[in-house]
Image (cartoon, helix red, strand yellow):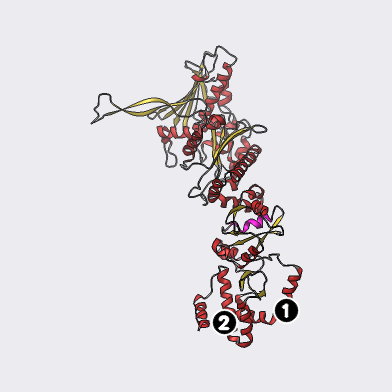
Amino acid sequence: MEKQQFKAESKRLLDLMINSIYTHREIFLREIISNASDAMDKLAYTALTDDQVGISREDLAITITRDEKNRTITVSDNGIGMSREEMEENLGTICKSGSLNFKQNMEKKEEIDIIGQFGVGFYSAFMVASSVTVISKKYGEDTAWKWVSDGADGYTVEQAQRDAAGTDVIMTLKEDTEDEENSRFLQEYELRNLIRKYSDYIRYPIRMEVSKSRKKADSSEDQPEYENYTELETLNSMVPLWQRNKKDVAEEAYHSFYREKFFDYNKPARTIHFSAEGTVSFKALLYIPGKAPYDFYTKEAKRGLQLYSSGVMIMETCEDLLSEHFRFVRGVVDSQDLSLNISREMLQHDRQLTIIAKNIEKKIKAELTAMLENDRESYETFYEAFGRQLKYGAVANYGAHKASVQDLLLFWSHTQGKLISLKEYVEAMAEDQEKIYFVPGESRERLAKLPQVETLKKRGFDVLLFTDDVDEFVPQSLMTYMEKSFCNATSEDLGLRSEEEKRELDAKTEELKGFLTFVKETLGEQVKEVRLSADLGSYPVAMVPDAGMSFEMEKYMKRVDPQFAFPVGRILELNPEHEAVKALQNAMTEDPLKAKDYAQLLCCQAQLMADLPLEDPAAYTELVCKLMK
């Protein structure tokens, strides 16, 4: 029997594959099972027009046999089988085009997941097998054929015996090494896990002899004895939930699938089950979780959906299907338009995936919008868990995705005392209000007592209280909402004064120029500027940041990157109508030393109201005691 050689290009690819480092060696079983499923599909299709087939779809099955002693795994099917010519064509040529390209890519990278990147199908078996034997009988032919190869020195083809049409793929596993434990693929639990992971939704039964235990019939209840036995068991569930008609699936079935598939025993907030037809057809079953996983806001947390092709899992977490702002969504996507062997590298540039991702984005946004509008309580529970992620989505990539999330954001309303959307804020704005006002800080209680908030409240203007680190970045990203600009009430002009009032304040500033200079000289480097303000309401002072960055932003930068953080200029604002400020003015001429103490006291009070740390708390205490004497 003459040994035949692989075609030159195929041999180069096979050499590279067998001798390279793989990150997904376990993929071989998926490939062999998928080939078996394809073969049965072809026979089932042939049966539609050929009455002689003599086998129904219900009779088709895949059988896995393991032999630990001889170190073999056999995958058998009763599909259409192969002729000798088909064996040589299908098994003697690997990746008929693109092989040289593949070799060039390999030379550029130190490590590559070859299977994940190029999907060599049947030949993935040689990652774990020292030799592969294929025995196949073509439907309608009398002769079976046996193809044997060690993956290096070509292959042989000879006649064989097989009763019925179908194919057996017999893989003799390599010996274990320090780096590769091939024996694990002979274990029942390992094969079971791989089948459930990659091939659970193959439409035909995948069967294997499994070990079981039962009580002996003649043993007593007090001292029961057990015996072991084996039983042929179907390991895959075959019909995926997402392939069923939505109206035929009970809510509990959705929840059960979610618990089993994603190991979350909390009830999901929403289930999204839909299909799409068009340029790319696909089905999707998505879940919006009810609670955030403990590691959700960590770097270790992965985003992505499980990607299937005709029921066969391609990727466990396909990031390209899910936008970063919706990374909390879990679920599966199944499209027959994708290649089974599609790679991570190819996926990142695949136009079909882009189309699917856009459809998914629209569906998720629509579901969240419906929850916000029709089930506010549930939405606020969801928002407590994932609202921060939506805000991150609004600011990421310079606001590239702000349109997708801006209507879903909620912030605390000072006037209404609850969470509201930006749309609700704008719709409730006073007739003469031009801006969306907000104040950033660490607690709503502190923010509610700021002088600027009091002033705005008296005018009938609501203020959004920002308490998340990311909140202050949102207005910078959105810039406007429903044609209304944002205004940080602690650092920007509130825009409340008429031109006449502005002139009056300018005149007052000129009148008290000497007084303002005295206060600035007293405080020295503690403040960058001292000025008058008509926006402080009943409060005597306020500390506001110089233009560019707020105090909360300064604190944030110190936490995130202390090395590059820098202090924001502090501006002390004085209310010229307040009795305390007038007392300071009087003391400046009557008792300059006391006036300096008053100036220092008001400066410390302004810092405390702005939630800024005092440089010397002990000195402040001594100052208060001194003035009380």
Q: Is residue 485 above or below residue 519?
A: above
Q: Nearer the viewer, residue 397 or 68?
A: 397
x, y (%) of residue 46?
58, 17
- Residue at the spot 67% in from the left edge and 74% down from the top edge: 532
Residue 92, image x, y percentages: 56, 26
Residue 479 within the magenta-colored segment of the rendering: yes
The residue positioned farthest toward the top in the image shown: 52
Q: Which residue is mark 1?
A: 510
* Amino acid on which disc 1 is placed: Glu
User: Dot 2: within a 10 Å radius of its alpha carbon, few (fewer than 14), some, or many (20 or more) residues?
Assistant: many
Q: Residue 352 appears in which quarter of the rendering?
A: top right
Q: Which residue is pictured at 56% across the width and 78% down the height?
A: 601
Q: Is residue 125 visible?
A: no
Question: Which residue is the site of mark 2?
Answer: 597
Image height check: is 59 above or below 358?
Answer: above
User: At x 53% / y 48%, what residue is drawn?
Assistant: 381
Name which quarter of the figure residue 219 lies in.
top left
Residue type at tag 2: Asp
Secondary structure of residue under mark 1: helix
Mark before the other along the chain sequence, 2 or 1: 1
Whether residue 369 is visible here, answered yes or no, is yes
| Range of magenta residues | 470-481
Q: Is residue 191 magenta?
A: no
Q: Eyeballing the image, is 599 above or below 182?
A: below
In the image shown, does 371 or 297 lie closer to the viewer? Answer: 371
497 and 105: which is toward the camera: 497
Task: Identify the mark at residue 168; answer none if there is no mark.
Answer: none
Count the labels in the image: 2
Measured as percent of width and height from the top left, residue 593 is found at 58, 86
- Give SS at disc 2: helix
- Measuring from the top left, give residue 509's x and y in whole percent: 71, 77
